Image: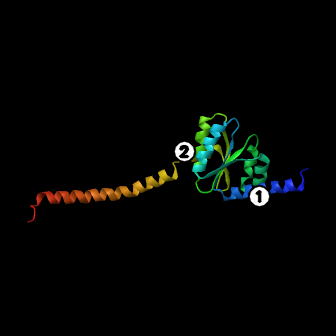
C-alpha cells in the first residue's frame, strides 16, 4: 500500500486531470506505441501550435479521473500505452491532426474521444477530422457574403460604363 504522501500526490494528479478534462471542449485518446521520438516531437509541435495539450497519461489515473462522469465510457479502451490530446477551444484540430498522423504511422491508433463531455466513437472522430479548419470556414463564409456585394458593384459599374459611352463629353 502506498504511503500517505504518494497517495496524496496521485489524488492531486487525478484532480488536475479531471479539471483539464472538464475544461476541454474536445479530446482524443490515442495509443502511441511504436512512435519514434522524432515523430513524436513533430506531432507534439504541430499540436502545440494548434493550441492542443498533448500528454502521456497512466490508464489508472485517467480511469479514476473519468469515473462517475459522462466520460466514464472511455474506461473500456484504457489499456496499453495511452496519451490524450485536449482542446479548450477548437473542436476539430486534435481529431484532424491525430487522424492524419495515424494514417501515416501504422502503430499509432486512435482509441476514443469526447466532444462537449460526451464520449464519441471512431466514426465521429473521422467525421471531425474531415471538417475544414476554422480559418477555412470563416474564409468561405466571408466569400459567400462578399459575392452578392461584388456582383452588385459590377452591375452598377456596367450601368455607369454603358451610360457613359453614348453621351458626349461635357465642356
- The crowding category of the residue bearing disc 2, from other C-alpha atoms within 10 Å (few below 14, some 14 to 19, many at least 20), is some
Residue 42 shows in the view: yes
Question: Horizontally, is 58 left or right of 101 in the view?
Answer: right
How packed mark 1 is, by other alpha carbons closer than 10 Å (few <14, some 14-19, many 20 or more), is some
Dot 2 or dot 1: first in sequence order is: 1
Which residue was labeled with disc 2?
A: 130
Please tell me which residue is depicted at 24% across the width and 58% down the height of the picture: 157
Residue extending farthest to the bottom is 171
Residue for point 19% across, 57% down? 161
Residue 95 visible, this orientation: no
- Left or right of residue 17: residue 88: left
Task: Name the residue rendered at 76%, 42% in the picture.
Answer: 79
Determine which quarter of the picture holds residue 143: bottom left
- Determine whether the residue tagged by mark 1 lies in a helix, strand or loop: helix
x then y, percent, for residue 133? 52, 50
Side of 147 where 104 appears, left or right: right
Residue 15: image tag: 1
Give the quarter of the figure containing the C terminus: bottom left
Which disc is residue 69 wearing?
none
Where is residue 144 drawn, in percent x and y? Answer: 40, 55
Amino acid at each position: 500500500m502506498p504511503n500517505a504522501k504518494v497517495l496524496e500526490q496521485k489524488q492531486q494528479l487525478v484532480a488536475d486531470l479531471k479539471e483539464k478534462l472538464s475544461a476541454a471542449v474536445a479530446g482524443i485518446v490515442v495509443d502511441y506505441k511504436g512512435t519514434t521520438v522524432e515523430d513524436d516531437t513533430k506531432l507534439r509541435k504541430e499540436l502545440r501550435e494548434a493550441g492542443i495539450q498533448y500528454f502521456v497519461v497512466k490508464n489508472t489515473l485517467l480511469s479514476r479521473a473519468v469515473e462517475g462522469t459522462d466520460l466514464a465510457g472511455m474506461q473500456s479502451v484504457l489499456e496499453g500505452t495511452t496519451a490524450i490530446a485536449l482542446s479548450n477551444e477548437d473542436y476539430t484540430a486534435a481529431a484532424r491532426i491525430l487522424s492524419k498522423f495515424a494514417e501515416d504511422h501504422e502503430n499509432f491508433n486512435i482509441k476514443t474521444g469526447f466532444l462537449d463531455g460526451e464520449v464519441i466513437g471512431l466514426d465521429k472522430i473521422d467525421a471531425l477530422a474531415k471538417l475544414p479548419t476554422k480559418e477555412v470556414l470563416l474564409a468561405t463564409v466571408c466569400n459567400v457574403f462578399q459575392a452578392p456585394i461584388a456582383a452588385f458593384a459590377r452591375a452598377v459599374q456596367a450601368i455607369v460604363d454603358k451610360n457613359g459611352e453614348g453621351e458626349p463629353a461635357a465642356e
